[in-house]
C-alpha cells in the first residue's frame, strides 16, 4: 500500500507519477521564491494533472512551510494522488536559531514516525506531544527550543499522514546535523518501512550515503537519490543502480546547468544498459518564479508536455511507462 494525503491506496492505482515536486516551500535559500499560496499551488498542480500525471510526491520536509491540509484539499480538487514527506532537508535550509536544531536523534525519530503513523501537524512544527521526548542533549537548545517552535507555529496533530522520509546532505559533506537526520531517517524507516529520499548535491557522496543507511538497516532499494542527474555520469549511475538504489532524474528545463539534450542522452544510456527499472522522473520545479500560477515559467506541465514526448521518441513507450508508472509504484509501496 502507498500512503497518500487522502489515505492508503493500492500500488496499481497510483498511475504516472512525478517523483519530486514542491507545492509548498519556504526556505531562506530561496528568497522571493516562496510557494505559500494555496490557490496558486492548486492551479499549478492542476497543470501537472492535465499534462498526463495522476500522482506526485511533495518533497517538502519538516520546517520548510509544509501545509498538509492544503495538500489534501489540492489532491481532492485536482484528482492527483499526493504523497507527503517527513524528515529534514540539508542543514543549509535551516538558519541558526531555527527550532529544528533543537531536535536530537530521539526527537527527530519520534517526529518522523508520528508524521507517518499519526499525522502531520497542522502548522509546520513538531507536535506538542513530541516535545516530551526531547532531553536537551541534542544539537541545539533542547526542550526550550521546541517549546518556542510550538508557541510560534501552533502545532496540532492531523490525520493527514506522510508517506516518505527525507534527508539531505551538502556537496561532498555530511554535517553533524545531517548525519543525525540520516540516523533518524533510518530509525523511522525501520519502524514504518516507508521509503527514503536523500537530497544530494550534484550526486556527490551517493555511495557514502547508501553505505551509512545500509549500516543502519535501510536497503538501497528503498532509497531514491534525488538529483542524481546533476552529475550526468552513466558509470556512476549504473554503479548505484547495481546496488539497487533508485536514480532520481529531475533536472529538466535547467539550461544554465545542463541542457535537456544532455539529460535525454544520459537516460538513453541508462536504458540501453538495462537499468530503466531504477529511474524515477520528476521536475523539482520548486520555485515561485518557475511556476506559471505564480507568474513564472515553465511550470509543472513542462515535464509531461515538453520533456516526456522527447524521451518517448528516444527510448520508446515501454521504458517511459516503466519510469513513470511501474517504478514509482514499486518504490513507494509498502506491502
Image: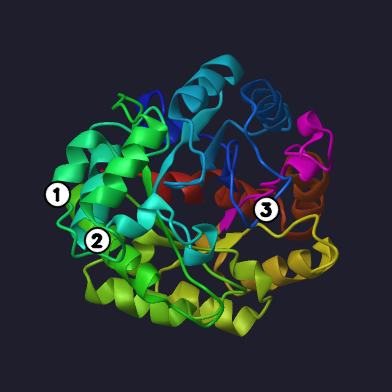
Q: Earlier in the sequence, mark 2 or mark 1?
A: 2
The percent position of residue 287, horizontal first and vertical second, equals 71, 46
Comparing 54 with 208, the one in front is 208
Q: CA distance from mark 2 to mark 3?
A: 26 Å
Q: Is residue 212 above or below residue 113?
A: below
The percent position of residue 120, horizontal first and vertical second, equals 34, 33
Q: Is residue 267 visible?
A: yes
Comparing 124 with 53, the one in front is 124
Q: Residue at x 70, y 48 (%)?
A: 285
Q: Residue at x 82, y 52 (%)?
A: 310
* SS label for mark 3: loop
Residue sitting farthest toward the top: 77
Residues shaded magenta: 280-301
Which residue in the structure is indicated by mark 3? 30
In the drawing, what numbered circle is on residue 10? none
Which residue in the structure is indicated by mark 2? 104
The percent position of residue 186, horizontal first and vertical second, equals 26, 62
Q: Residue at x 60, y 19 (%)?
A: 78
Q: Is residue 193 visible?
A: no
Q: Is residue 287 above or below residue 255?
A: above
Q: Earlier in the sequence, mark 1 or mark 3?
A: 3
- The quadrant holding residue 2 is top left
Which residue in the structure is indicated by mark 1? 133
* Residue 300 as seen in the image, left or right of residue 275: right
Q: CA distance from mark 2 to mark 1?
A: 9 Å
Protein image colouring: rainbow
Amino acid at each position: 500500500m502507498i500512503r497518500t494525503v487522502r489515505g492508503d491506496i493500492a500500488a496499481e492505482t497510483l498511475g504516472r507519477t512525478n517523483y519530486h515536486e514542491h507545492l509548498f516551500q519556504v526556505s531562506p535559500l530561496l528568497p522571493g521564491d516562496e510557494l505559500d499560496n494555496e490557490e496558486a499551488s492548486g492551479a499549478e498542480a492542476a497543470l501537472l494533472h492535465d499534462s498526463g500525471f495522476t500522482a506526485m510526491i511533495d518533497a517538502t520536509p519538516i520546517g520548510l512551510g509544509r501545509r498538509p491540509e492544503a495538500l489534501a484539499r489540492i489532491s481532492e480538487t485536482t484528482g492527483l494522488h499526493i504523497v507527503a514527506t517527513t524528515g529534514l532537508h540539508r542543514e543549509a535550509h535551516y538558519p541558526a536559531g531555527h527550532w529544528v536544531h533543537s531536535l536530537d536523534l530521539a526527537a527527530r525519530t519520534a517526529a518522523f514516525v508520528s508524521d507517518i503513523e499519526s499525522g502531520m501537524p497542522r502548522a509546520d512544527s513538531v507536535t506538542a506531544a513530541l516535545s516530551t521526548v526531547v532531553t536537551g542533549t541534542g544539537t541545539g537548545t533542547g526542550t526550550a527550543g521546541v517549546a518556542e517552535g510550538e508557541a510560534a507555529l501552533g502545532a496540532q496533530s492531523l490525520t493527514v499522514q506522510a508517506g516518505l522520509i527525507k534527508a539531505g546532505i551538502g556537496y561532498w559533506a555530511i554535517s553533524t546535523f545531517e548525519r543525525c537526520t540520516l540516523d533518524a531517517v533510518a530509525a523511522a524507516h525501520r519502524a514504518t518501512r516507508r521509503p527514503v529520499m536523500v537530497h544530494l548535491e550534484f550526486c556527490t557522496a551517493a555511495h557514502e550515503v547508501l553505505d551509512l543507511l545500509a549500516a543502519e538497516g535501510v536497503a538501497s532499494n528503498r532509497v531514491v537519490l534525488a538529483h542524481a542527474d546533476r552529475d550526468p555520469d552513466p558509470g556512476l549511475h549504473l554503479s548505484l543502480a547495481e546496488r539497487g538504489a533508485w536514480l532520481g532524474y529531475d533536472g529538466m528545463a535547467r539550461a544554465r546547468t545542463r541542457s535537456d539534450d544532455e539529460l535525454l542522452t544520459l537516460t538513453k544510456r541508462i536504458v540501453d544498459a538495462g537499468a530503466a527499472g531504477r529511474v524515477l522522473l520528476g521536475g523539482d520545479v520548486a520555485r515561485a518564479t518557475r511556476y506559471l500560477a505564480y507568474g513564472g515559467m515553465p511550470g509543472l506541465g513542462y515535464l509531461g508536455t515538453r520533456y516526456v514526448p522527447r524521451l518517448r521518441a528516444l527510448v520508446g513507450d515501454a521504458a517511459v511507462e516503466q519510469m513513470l508508472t511501474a517504478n514509482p509504484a514499486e518504490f513507494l509501496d509498502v506491502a
